Amino acid sequence: MSVDSMSSNKTSPLSNLTPRGTELDDNEFFQRKVERSTISRQNQYMSTLQSGQKIRNTMNNNPTKVFAETSRNKSSSSLNSQGNGRSVSNYHDRSSLPRSQNQRRPHPESTSGAYPPNRPQTRQSRMTAPRFLQVLNDCFFSKFCNDELFYFEYRDSLLKRVQENTYHNNTDDLEDILSEVVESCKSTKLNLDAVVQWKLGRFDHTTESSVIDHLFLINVNVMSYDIKYTRSCVERACADPLCCDLHLESISENDKARAFRRVLNIILNEAIRTNILKKDQKTMIRSRLIKSHFLIEDRVSVIREMGLLIMLGQTARYRDLSLFGILNVGSSWSPPPEIIPDLDRECSLDPEKVFQKAVSTSSNPFMESILDVRRLGLGVSSSELASLLKLWDQVVPNSNSAKKLTIPMLLHILVHCSEHELQKALSEAAIKDDLQIQSDRISQIEDAALQAVQNLGLAWELGDNPPRDLRQLCIALVLDVGSILSKFIIREKSRLQSSNSDVDEIGFVEDGLFNTWFEICSLFVKNERSKKGFLVSLLLSYLNISSERLLAQKADFNPELYLTILLELLTEFRKRRPNYFPICVAPDRSLIDSRDVDGKPVELDRTTKESIGSEFDRLFAWIDPNIPTSNRVRTLIRPISPKNLNTSSSKTHISAQMGSESPKNNNQSLHEAAVMAVELSESINSRFHIN
């Protein structure tokens, strides 16, 4: 029966219904009731469209399931509305309540006039675009959109992007963005640990990142822009001011330099905040680095080094050393006056030392991979290598058949083989390769070998009177330290047989010459951090970072600072003797807890432990005379006073620890020095403890 028919038929029995608690006549009452019912259905329909549950309600009338589906829909919609790099961990916390509450279907008896039908209770967001922009301006734009953190064009485009795209986002997404921005603005501290490890992805994928972390990553992405590997935001209407993806169509070299200037501002502000630098020193350092570092590799290296020195300088012992390193970063190093007269003295190789080095290298995979003549690019062909290896077997008959020809082996062959034997072997190799026989081929190979000896710093170890070139000493120490640390590494073999199809088609692709050194450093740093050994991880991280400039022969590499920190690292390792534990590595280069058949952790054998300890002692005794305690850099390390010890219980613990390492040492002065050293290590570990 229609409303019109009810209105026209005034004698209808509908007028004899139960009392309604109103003075309206029947026609007007039913007319208004139908209108309210229509409006209610329309409101419910619109709310289901907004919450995305309309289709699910028509397919399943189970209220519990609909509630769960609605909750999941909000979380996924918030996720899709953000860029790929945004954090979403806090979205799930806010998605525990659905956007619209599900209403149970009312009982027919409850729809009488005395009990009006339930209305759908939709969640009304109080967020509006003007309010979003106002709060964003108060907490972010007014405080952080300045020339110190953004260059002008980027700052202008950021403001325009947020203002225009705000009106293209729904209120729930605006609430999500605003809550993240407000949470980030609560902290202005840069995560130096992530900067040193160069794991900047954690800035963009965790809710714990500060606003400075986001701004640092934004400027780094601009600084490292590459048109072939660009990282652009995929959101059509991104209104997030902390989105770290790129929103610019193109970036010039000038833009990269200006972004690098802002990155330096942020990292140097941390040095000022920790009272290592003063404000007037900041401008001098920044200006020097901007004008001298243009390659992205150099810029990243200097940023990581300054971050590490700031972390190291937060301890009183290394504060002066940290200040010296930051003030001189990017400056060309000049040798101290006391070693300048010794740089040009003549040096000749000792045949006995060369032979001992050749024998020891053949049993050391790390050293053998770096000193391999083929990998060093000396211009020696494969046929010549095979001929020279045969000469090695003739000269050293008791040696095992070598598969690789190293520099010490080549030097030994050039010394102990006659010119006739060498010329015959090289001529046969040339004939095999269909090449012309060269009469001066022996001198060419000899010159290349001697140049490699100089470049790798082997003259310090193989010469009888080596020149005191500290740069060459540092390169030689990279080889020796790497060979010692490689003894800690136990690599687990893969149980799966790899396919030969890749090898057949691609062949064998080699890594860089010193890639193994950087890999070992990374494994050690990761292992030390897992065991809360943050002092060793910081010292080794510095060697890892600065080695890049050392091997690239950069003028701003400071060997005095390098050797000073290396001595500190060797001291830490020597204190652990003989408690050296292996680092077990899976085939995918991840750390594992390897155990033997009895379920006990794998340990190094006693001979290996003693060999490692002896090698650390040898390196310390080698470096110490070349950079004595009176050196201008080494004197910057402050001694630790015994007054800094905290409690008697800590003294007892430290004494017991040192006593277990050297029970026969009863010298009181050495004992106090050991106690102070352990206290320093524990203080740094507690300072840099990271959850």
Image: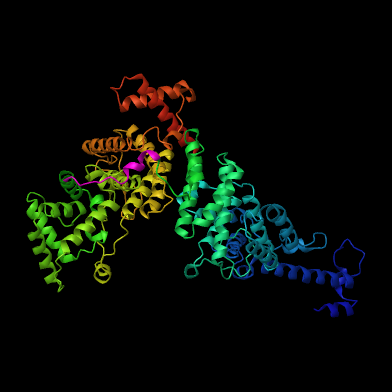
Q: Is residue 649 above or below residue 523?
A: above
Residue 241 placement, left or right of 672: right
Q: 606 or 621, which is in the foreground? A: 621
The quarter in which the N terminus is drawn is bottom right
At 13% from the left and 70% from the top, the residue drawn is: 437
Q: Is residue 621 visible?
A: yes
Image quadrant of residue 108?
Answer: bottom right
At 31% from the left and 34% from the top, the residue drawn is: 579
Image quadrant of residue 562?
Answer: top left
Q: Position of residue 69 (x, y in %)?
A: 58, 62
Q: Is residue 372 above or below residue 1?
A: above
Q: Position of residue 334 (x, y in %)?
A: 42, 46
Residue 623 placement, left or right of 440: right
Q: 304 or 499, which is in the foreground? A: 304
**Total count of labels:** 0
Residue 349: within the magenta? yes
Q: 596 or 187, which is in the foreground? A: 187
At 13% from the left and 59% from the top, the residue drawn is: 388
Residue 647: within the magenta? no
Residue bounds of the magenta highlight = 337-350
Q: Position of residue 598 (x, y in %)?
A: 25, 40
Q: 548 or 534, which is in the foreground? A: 548
Q: Position of residue 262 (x, y in %)?
A: 58, 55
Residue 367 placement, left or right of 296: left
Q: Is residue 593 visible?
A: no
At 14% from the left and 55% from the top, the residue drawn is: 414
